[in-house]
Image: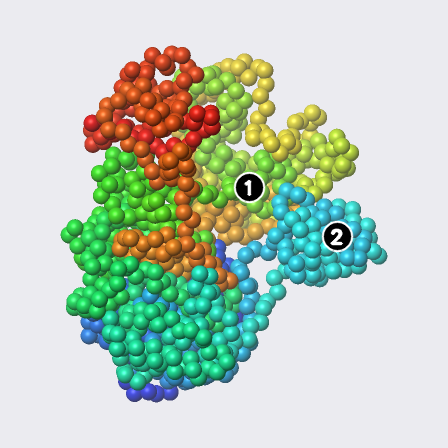
Amino acid sequence: MLPQKRGVDAGEVQDLHNKAPRPAAPAPAQDHHKEDPAHMAARAPEIDEDLHSRQLAVYGRETMKRLFGSNVLVSGLQGLGAEIAKNLVLAGVKSVTLHDDGKVDLWDLSSNFFLSEKDIGLNRAQACVPKLQELNNAVIISTITGDLTKEQLSNFQAVVFTDISIEKAVEFDDYCHSHQPPIAFIKSEVRGLFGSVFCDFGPEFTVLDVDGEEPHTGIVASISNDNPALVSCVDDERLEFQDGDLVIFSEVHGMTELNDGKPRKIKSARPYSFTLEEDTTSYGTYIRGGIVTQVKPPKVLKFKTLKEAIKEPGEFLMSDFSKFDRPPLLHLAFQALDKFRTELLRFPIAGSAEDAQKLIDFAISINESLGESKLEEIDKKLLQHFASGSRAILNPMAAMFGGIVGQEVVKACSGKFHPLYQFFYFDSVESLPIEPLEASDLKPENSRYDAQISVFGTKLQKKLEQSKIFMVGSGALGCEFLKNLALMGISCSENGKLTVTDDDVIEKSNLSRQFLFRDWNIGQPKSTVAATAAMAINPKLHVEALQNRASPETENVFNDAFWESLDAVVNALDNVTARMYIDSRCVYFQKPLLESGTLGAKCNTQMVIPHLTENYGASRDPPEKQAPMCTVHSFPHNIDHCLTWARSEFEGLLEKTPTEVNAFLSNPSGYATAARTAGDAQARDQLERVIECLNRDKCDTFQDCITWARLKFEDYFANRVKQLTFTFPEDAMTSSGAPFWSAPKRFPRPLEFSSSDPSHLNFLLAASILRAETFGIPIPDWAKNPKKLAEAVDKVILPDFQPKQGVKIETDEKATSLSSASVDDAAVIEELIAKLEAISKTLPPGFHMNPIQFEKDDDTNFHMDLIAGFANMRARNYSIPEVDKLKAKFIAGRIIPAIATSTAMATGLVCLELYKVLAGGHKVEDYRNTFANLAIPLFSMAEPVPPKTIKHQDMAWTVWDRWTITGNITLRELLEWLKEKGLNAYSISCGTSLLYNSMFPRHKERLDKKVVDVAREVAKVEVPSYRRHLDVVVACEDDDDIDVDIPLVSIYFR
C-alpha cells in the first residue's frame, strides 16, 4: 500500500528462522525499545495523511508516531494470529515478527485467509509473509520458524501468543514483566465457540488517554463567590462532566484567579452547572466570559503476572450479563484444556464423550484445588461443547478476537486507551444448531471446512454453502465480511450465490483498513476488486459483483424475484438512509437482516429477524444538533462553527456560483424564466452573485485572482467584523437590558492583513489558485514563491470601508435564511436579468467556468488549505483556538473515524449470528445485539427487542405482517373486506398518491373501479410485468373511532 519501507536496513528484513535456539542478536528493534514513547514519536517518520486519515481521526499524530516506532511479535499463525497480524500491519507498526514452527494443514484454511491449498506443508509463518506484506510495504515483516527463547522477546515492545502452553506462557510473561522496560505480554486463544484474552503490561503501565474522547468543555455564564463555588454554564448544550472530574478555566473576566491553569475538582455535576471544591469568597467578582475544560490525567495500572492472575484472577471483564457465571467456569475450562493437551499431546476429538469426560475431570480436579474460591457447580454440558470444538479455530471467532487483541497491542505500544485488565472470556454456544449433533456429523471430510464441521456438523455446512446472500456495500465492513464469508464457505456451491453491490470506487484513504484493496486498485470499483480478492481466498466462492446503489431507482435490478430468492441480507453500509431503505425491503420480503456499524473504536451489531425482532427502523438515534445559522454566520464560539462557515463559503464561491454561471450561459432565456417564476429573495441573491462573478469579480489574469483573494480577505476578516461591531458595539444591550455580547457570544476584532504573516499569505495562495482554476487561468511558477506572492499582494489597492447605519444582521436563532424578502423582489429581478443579459454579450465566445467540488482527500489540491485558512482567520477574529489542517479536514470533511480493529470485531460478531440465521429454528433469546467500545474496553451483549405487537379484536400483528387479498378487486370490495375485520377504512393511498378518502365526495365515484385501475389513473403506477400484486397503505379506525395501524395490504390481481 505504501510506496517504500521506512528506514529499513537490508539486514532487518530477513528470516530469523534457525531451528536451534540461540540468543537474540542485538537488533535495531532493541535500540528502539530502550527509548521512551516521546523519543520514539519524535524519531518516527512522517505520517502519510492521505492513507491514514481515518485512523489519525481515532488515534491522533502522537499515538501514530509511537506505533510507527513499535516492534511486535505474533506467535502462532493459525486464524487468530493471522487476524492480529493483519490488524497490526494495517495500523502501521514499525515491524511485525511472525513466529510459528508448525506447518500449514487443511484445518488452517477455515480461518487463515493468507493461506491456500498450495501452502499445505509449508511453514505457517513463512507462508503468511507475501500476502501480509502486500497490506503495507512500510511495515517490516520477518519470521522466526524455530523455537523461541525468552531472550529474543527483548527485541519487542509487545508480544502476543495465540497457541502456547500455560507453563511456557508463565515463563515468558515473568521475563516480560520483570524486563526493563517491561514488555507487554498478551495471551489469547480461540477454541471453537470459546475465546480468551489475558493482558500483562508490566508492574506499572501509564495510560495517557483512557477513552480517546475529546475533553468536555462548557461556556461559563456565572460563578458565585462562595465556599464551595457554584459554576453555571450557558444552556445551549448540556455539560458532560461527572463528579470527580478535573477542570481548568480560561478567559474568565472578573474572577481572574481561576485563569491560573490549575486543575480543579468538581462535584454535584448537573446538566448546566457544577460546584467547585474551592473557596472563592475572597476572589474577584465574576463579570463575564470563561471556558471550562476537562483535564484528563494519566492513569497508572499495576498488572499481575500470569502466574499470580491464574490463581487470583480478580474481576473478569463481562460481555453478556445473561451469562454472569460463565467467566469463572471458562477460566477453569481453558486450564483444563491446557492440562489435557499437555498430558495427551492432542486436542479432544470432536463428539468424543470419552475425551469430553477427561476434560471435565481435569476441570473438577483444578476446581477442587482452589479451596474457598472453588466453584459450587460445574456446567458439564457447557464443558462438553467446549471440549468437542476445542481444536477448531473458527473464522468469526478469530475475526472478533483479532480485533480485540490488535487493539490491546496498540494500547501497549502507545498508552492510548484503557487496557483490558486482565482476563476476558467469551462464548457463543447459542450459535450451535438447535438439534443435537451426533459424533458422526462432526467427522472430518478432508475439506477446507473440516474445522467448522467439527463444531457445527455437515448439515449446517451444506446450508452455508448453498445459501443465497445479498451483501450491500464493500468498503471496510464489506472487505472483512467477504473474507469471513469466503472462509466459512458461504455461497461456495453451485446452488449458492453471494451478490455484492457497491457504487463506490477505491480511494487511497481506503487502504489503511479495507484490506482486500491494493494501491494499484485505486480508481477501480470496490465491489469487483473485493469480490475478486475474496475468490482468491476461496476459489469456490460463487459471487456476483455489481456497481448499483441499492435504492428505489434500482428496483428493476434488485427486483421481487431477486429478493424472494435470498436467505439473508448483510449490510456493510456507512449511512442511515441506505440502511433504512434496505431495512424496509427486508421487512417487506420477510428476510433476515444482519446490521452493523463502526465509529472509531466503537462498534455495534443488530439482528433483524422476521417476526422475532424489531426492525432497524423501529428505533432511531436523535438527529445531531445543528448550530443556528446566525451563530455560524455572525456569532461563532467554537472552531466547528468556523469550519462549518468555511465549508459553506468554499462551496458558494467555487462550486455553486460557477455552476449558476454555467446554467445561465447554457440557457439564458430558461434561466431568466426560472428566476422570474421563483421571484423570491433567494432568486434575487443568486442573480446578484452571478452578475458579481461575471462583472466586478471576473478574473482574466492570475494577478486578478490575487486581487480578488486580497479583497475577500479584507471583506471577510476586517470589513464584516467592523460592520458587526458597529451595529452591535461591545457595550450593546439587548431589549431586555442584558449585555448583547454575553456568553456564548464572543466579541470579535478585525484582522489587519500582513504579507509577512505566513497564515495570511497561505490563505491568499490557496484562494488565488482555486479562483484561477474556476476561470481556467494557468498558475504561474512564481505563485508558490512566498516573496513574489507577497510582492503581487502588496500591489493590490484596497477601497476605503465605512460601516453603514441600519444594516440588518440576523440574530434570531430560529432563522433558516439570511436573505430578507422584500416587496419589490420581482422588479429587482427584472433589472438584474437585464443587467446579466448585457454582461453576457461582453463575454468571449464559448466562455464557461469550472466549478470546483470539495475533495478532502487530496492534499495537493489546496481545498483544505483554503478551508483551514478561512476557518482559522475567522477563529482569530473571535479569539477561538485555531486548528491545523488535519483537524480541519476531520471536521469540515466530516470524516468518520475508522480503524481496522473495531471493523474486524463487528464482522466477527455478525458472522456468529449468521450461523444461527442460516441454521434456522433459533428463538429470539439465542440472538445477540452488541455494542462494544474497544477503547475502554466495554462489551455489552443483549438479546434483541421483539417487535411491537398491535392487537385488534381477536387479531394481532407486527411490522413483519402483510395482509394479502387475491383477486382484481374494486375499492368498494377492499373497504368491505376490511369492514369484516371490524375496521373502517377512511383513506387508501399508493406511493405518494391518495386513491380514496372518505371526506372527498368525488372519490365516491371511484368506489366501483378496480384498485389497480385507480392506481394507474391517479398515481400513474404501472405494475411491472414481473410483479403480480399492488401494495396500498390503508388508514383505518375501529367502531369507537380510534385509529388502528394495520399492515401493508397487497392485492394479488394477476
Q: Amino acid at mark 1?
A: Lys
Q: Which quarter shows the C terminus?
A: top left
- Mark carried by residue 625: 1
Image coordinates for residue 953, horizontal then vertical, percent: 40, 33
- Of residues 269 and 438, the one nearer the viewer is 438
At horizontal 77% and vertical 55% (from top left) the residue drawn is 229
Q: Residues within 10 Å of mark 2 (few under 14, many from 20)?
A: many
Could you classify mark 1 by the number of other residues whose Cα lies within 10 Å: few (under 14), some (14-19), or many (20 or more)? Answer: few
Of 568 and 387, which appears nearest the observer?
387
Compared to residue 678, the image places residue 268 above or below, namely below
Query: In the visual, does 983 lie left or right of 200?
Result: left
Classify 727 as above or below 158. Answer: above
Secondary structure of the residue carrying numbered label 1:
loop
Q: Position of residue 365 (x, y in %)?
A: 39, 82
Query: Which quadrant would residue 1 be assigned to in this image?
Result: bottom left
Judged from the image, the secondary structure of the residue bearing numbered disc 2 is strand
Tell which residue pokes out farthest to the front in this image.
Answer: 954
Lower sequence index among marks 1 and 2: 2
Q: Amino acid at mark 2?
A: Leu
Q: CA distance from mark 1 to mark 2?
A: 27 Å
Mark 2 = which residue? Answer: 230
**Do we see residue 483 in this rendering?**
no
